[in-house]
Image (cartoon, rainbow, N blue to C red):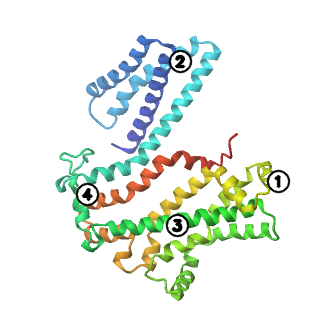
Amino acid sequence: MQAPAWLLTVALAYATALLWLALGVDALRRRRWGELALTVLLPPAALYLGLNLLPAGTWQAAGALAAPLVGLGGRYRALARSSAWKEARSRRQRLRQVALHLVLVTGAVVFVMPFVWLLSTSLKPDRLLMVIPPQWVPRPTLWSNYARALEFLPPETHHGLMYLWNTVYVSGLTILGVVLSSSLVAYSFARLRWPGRDLFFVVLLSSMMLPGAVTMVPVFLIFKWLGWVDTLRPLWVPAFFGSAFNIFLLRQFFLTIPMELEDAAKIDGAPFWVIYSRIMLPLVKPALAAVVIWTFMGAWNNFMGPLIYISSPEKMPVAYALQLYQSAHGSEYNLLMAAATLVVLPVIALFFFTQRYFIQGVTLTGIKG
């Protein structure tokens, strides 16, 4: 299909789907069951007839979509003219909501397709890897690809368990270091008064403009001088020195907490450490959850750090091990996708179960009550 015909077909499909859904929602809301049945059944029937009656060619799909679009558009205009102004305004608002949800659903499908392709390919036998069009649900479905992918790992790694332990170990210490150091520094910038506080905060924000390549060599020389090369320490020790962006995020959250809570604790004789740990931290849980999530994602997917500092195979994390696996078995796409699925599943599961806290933290919703 040529580009103009393809673009026109997509535009007509979206317009038809928008009017179809809007009229269906309107009929359902008014409990017009006969009208709802006609709205649901007639456009697909018209589309089916158009695809079968029109001659095959580049513009066949666009021509088949024209009939249901004209019918739905005429029906929508008739309803708009026969309705009171309040009902017409409500109908326009529903149309905008349907359009917004249609765009969001399309975006969700676009973003989820790579993972669907990853999962589908990981379950395919070798003969189905290059089949066009691809089989999204392969027959047969080979769950054994995951076991085969682990069998190719070196025996001394216990079929990848050593890589997993290294990653969990580094991720856990990184999360602990980032949360502890960033929250302490953020509390200091937000609540404590000390000379040069605002100047140091500007310097901290300025450090975010430095690219990682600028500090890569000096940091490597420091770790080499300490004798930490080919150990896991360079991957988690820097986390205990804070992160500029996380400090900024937590500082903004601390600033939204009313001063009266802190003043009441001071009147009761609570020191700063008690105020920080028992009053302030529980109130910034959404921000802390967001920091934990993307710190975990960064530590779990960290590839550059192990590439620079790690040379022993038994100390590699999963991201680096996956790259080595790709170098050795890059032509076996089903096994490679199975290994990649095993690596990415923990990150997806974590985000799926904690997305509410992540969104709250990113949007800086403040506190409740």
Relative to 219, 206 lies left or right: right
Frontmost of labels 4 and 1 is 1
In primary-sequence order, the first of circles 2 and 3 is: 2
| Res. 174 mark | 3
Position of residue 338 measured from the top left corner of the image (x, y, whole percent): 29, 57
Q: Quadrant of the N terminus?
A: top left
Identify the residue under disc 2: 77
In primary-sequence order, the first of circles 2 and 1 is: 2
Calculate the distance from the C-alpha at mark 4 to the C-alpha at mark 1. Answer: 60 Å
Q: Nearer the viewer, residue 154 or 184?
A: 184
Relative to 89, 143 lies left or right: left
Q: What element carries label 4?
A: helix
Q: Are marks 3 and 4 in contact (CB under 8 Å)?
A: no
Q: In this view, does 138 lie above or below 91?
A: below
In primary-sequence order, the first of circles 3 and 4 is: 4
Frontmost of labels 3 and 1 is 1
Q: Is mark 3 on a helix, strand or loop?
A: helix
Identify the residue under disc 4: 146
In primary-sequence order, the first of circles 4 and 1 is: 4
* Residue drawn at point x = 38 percent, y = 47 percent: 113
